[in-house]
Image (tube, coloured by chain):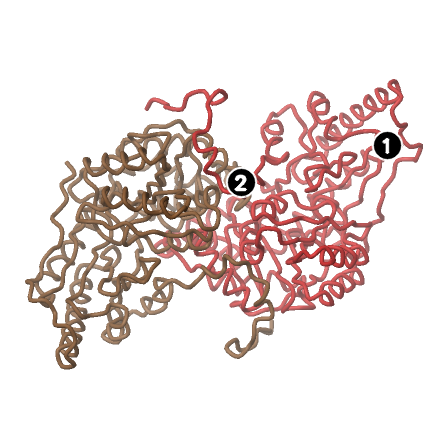
Chain colours: A red, B brown
Amino acid sequence: MEPTSPPTSTRLDPWLESYAARTRGLTASQVRALFAVASRPEVVSLAGGMPFVSALPLDAVAETVARLIRERGAVALQYGSGQGDVRLREQILDVMAPVGVTAHPDDIVVTAGSQMALDLVVRVFCDPGDVVLVEAPTYVTALGVFSSYQCEVVHVPMDEEGLRPDALREAVAAARAAGKKVKLVYTIPSFHNPAGVTQGPARRTEVLEVVQSAGLLLLEDDPYGLLGFDGTVPRAIRADDSEGVIYLGTFSKTIAAGLRVGWAVAPHGVREKLVLANETATLCPSNLTQMTISDYLATQPWFDQVKVFREVYRERRDALLESLEALMPAGTRWTVPAGGFYSWVTLPEGLDATAMLPRAVAALVAYVPGTGFYADGQGRESLRLSYCYPEPDRIREGVRRLAGVIESELEVVETFGSPRARADRPGPSAPYTDLA
Amino acid sequence: MEPTSPPTSTRLDPWLESYAARTRGLTASQVRALFAVASRPEVVSLAGGMPFVSALPLDAVAETVARLIRERGAVALQYGSGQGDVRLREQILDVMAPVGVTAHPDDIVVTAGSQMALDLVVRVFCDPGDVVLVEAPTYVTALGVFSSYQCEVVHVPMDEEGLRPDALREAVAAARAAGKKVKLVYTIPSFHNPAGVTQGPARRTEVLEVVQSAGLLLLEDDPYGLLGFDGTVPRAIRADDSEGVIYLGTFSKTIAAGLRVGWAVAPHGVREKLVLANETATLCPSNLTQMTISDYLATQPWFDQVKVFREVYRERRDALLESLEALMPAGTRWTVPAGGFYSWVTLPEGLDATAMLPRAVAALVAYVPGTGFYADGQGRESLRLSYCYPEPDRIREGVRRLAGVIESELEVVETFGSPRARADRPGPSAPYTDLA
């Protein structure tokens, strides 16, 4: 087999004039560019959001899949329903019970990962130019979806409890005053990616009230809801409004990301459109991966395994926070996540996380610069640290390297007379959020 | 868990005014509506296109997956590359060798089934109103994709060798004369779904010449290429043009549809955009299903298994054709597939396959009415018969029932003085296509 692809750098694209307008929003994310870097073993990657799937009982999963194929292979290897396996949809109700979501199995659409569900929701609702309100910062690949459907993204400020209801109300009013059509409010209320903060119960009520009074649809993305470190589970916003909230869930963080199984819970009319859109996009999700999850849920102590994951991530979160406290130069701030995978770091004044990244990689530590989580160029002073994948000792080593890089940057800033780093003592910028 | 979903028929959709314009093209396909019917065991379904996965060596597949998870579970259950597993992409080159496609592994994008690849190609190329030229009839869920991206679909007539180059040239000219932008020519050259015909080598050359001279991009969909019943494999059009053709392949018919693994081979600039679109839509295809296929290809006699599938389907095709010859009323015509899953039946004059469907289902046989394969209401006189899934005896019984329904319909037409069925003897409308 002889490769026919010539070297690519000098070749013109003959189809350059043929692409759809929406491709102007298709750009490589910084997370993606970092995967290549992060895969080098000498680099401590605090960049990627890979769950620590090695904590799974691999032998049990292997036996579950093998038995499934031997005994029900003719179904597991066949096309399935565009809405997803009905037994799995019933089990998803149990998985959502801790976050308080009640629904009928028919209200659930299973998708090839919750990313696909997010894509389908935007496909169903957003015409070019429609406004989507999102947190500042927000999940990077959600921005990719909004951009690929030519939405206008408006960032709404957060505080230590996440999305600010007052700012949300103002943003809706401003967009409408400008004659724009607001279609969705997208939020990650629990253990936010990338901000590491969580909306408390009162905050959720306020956010929902703003959304309801504006007659808007809330898109609640909840990949980390079961991963709270103190063992409590935040009540989903969807639990208090079944007609005005679309809820996105996933097995990527509670079982395994490599199975690509997520879901949406949606009001009836929306759900019908999501099923049709799902069929158009993929015909159906994989029966094999859906039934593997279904059998795993039915035969394994899956919630005990979630507790194992919590403990793994809590230990790593602690390693990160202790290292940050011990090593970060004055003026550095960070959020204190009560669950999930991420802390959001704000650098001392005058430093630029995007410009600093190559020097960090040279020092063998990787992170995601803050700008990746904004559609509008904000975030140069910030970065996201992930503690989900590396072992605690590696996290400590990564923070040590990062602290050294920041110190060097501060020296450069001082030497060249740029704005001085603030004299603040380093410390958490948000308290542990009490979700009890 | 108490279901919160009230009965749905009387409920208004509060989000009715919020949907995107593209949802007007999202309608339930006739194939989908038939799944419920076809699943009743007393019905002989000649409707669905489900491959006969029970012919797979299930124990070998089970052991392949189990070993994969035990030995490389930390990778198989993790997120992967947005372009797909690199080892699988190398193996896909071997899988495409029989159809003559040569490429570099970097030219391949693996997707959650080739339906996803089709969706991404249209996403990348088509703005609302852009024209896509397709065969008349064409694959039903491709129409769903074109519609969901608000394309204008123009059907190009076929003959017993598939897409007619002269008609294609005229259609391009007519669309351009009307000021429209033609973006893609979509074709299924081998063992067409639903038409059951195949482009011979000279026809492929003519089609490619028309496409090239018009400066257009060809989208070649090839799910059935390896399933020719005389053992020969048609040479893909992509084999003769690597810059002007996007080739779609799938493991759904050669291994298992339930794994949802397909791929696109695309020119360099297009491929880069497809990878970004793939990441936006699903982050990445499932590592588990990709690596399962990779290990299956590496350890099992996969091409021998393809030969087993060919033999299964050839036997069923023969059962279908023999029954049609023996039982169909005069004036009924059908295509004679040289591979793949489908024959296209044209009813005696005056009969309507869409109107006849409820009576067929009452007689316990199901098919897909021809109208489902057109965007413009054509096809009422035609229907698609699938022979891929039922055992030969069931196929014969299904044809017997269908012949009875058609005869009853003919009596109704005669009684009420509608146009008489033509006096033609029943028979194949296309010869066996020689692909040697």
Between marks 1 and 2 in the image, the one whose residue lies nearer the viewer: 2
For residue A369, above or below residue A434: above
Q: Which corner quadrant of the image does residue B163 belong to?
A: top left
Q: Quadrant of the N terminus of chain B?
A: bottom right
Q: Which mark is residue A23?
A: 2
Q: Which residue is mark 1?
A: A349
* Whether residue B66 can be seen here: no
Residue flagged by tag 2: what amino acid is it?
A: Thr
Q: Earlier in the sequence, mark 1 or mark 2?
A: 2
Instruction: Determine the CA span between mark 1 and mark 2.
Output: 36 Å
Q: Position of residue B9 (x, y in %)?
A: 50, 77
* Whether residue B24 can be seen here: yes
Q: Is residue A395 left or right of residue A126?
A: right
For residue A66, above or below residue B419: above
Q: Give me the chain letter of mark 2.
A: A
Q: Is residue A186 left or right of residue B161?
A: right
**Tags 1 and 2 in contact by the CB under 8 Å rule?**
no
Q: Position of residue A342 (x, y in %)?
A: 72, 42
Q: Give me the chain letter of mark 1.
A: A
Residue flagged by tag 1: what amino acid is it?
A: Glu
Q: Position of residue B433 (x, y in %)?
A: 14, 44
Q: Please rate how many residues cluster around mark 1, counting C-alpha atoms within 10 Å: few if below 14, some from 14 to 19, many from 20.
A: some
Q: Is residue A347 left or right of residue A188?
A: right
Q: Which structural element holds mark 2? A: helix
Q: Residue at x 37, y 37 (%)?
A: B217
Q: Quadrant of the C terminus of chain B?
A: top left
Residue located farthest toward the top when viewing the structure as drawn: A415
A420 and A67: which one is in front?
A: A420
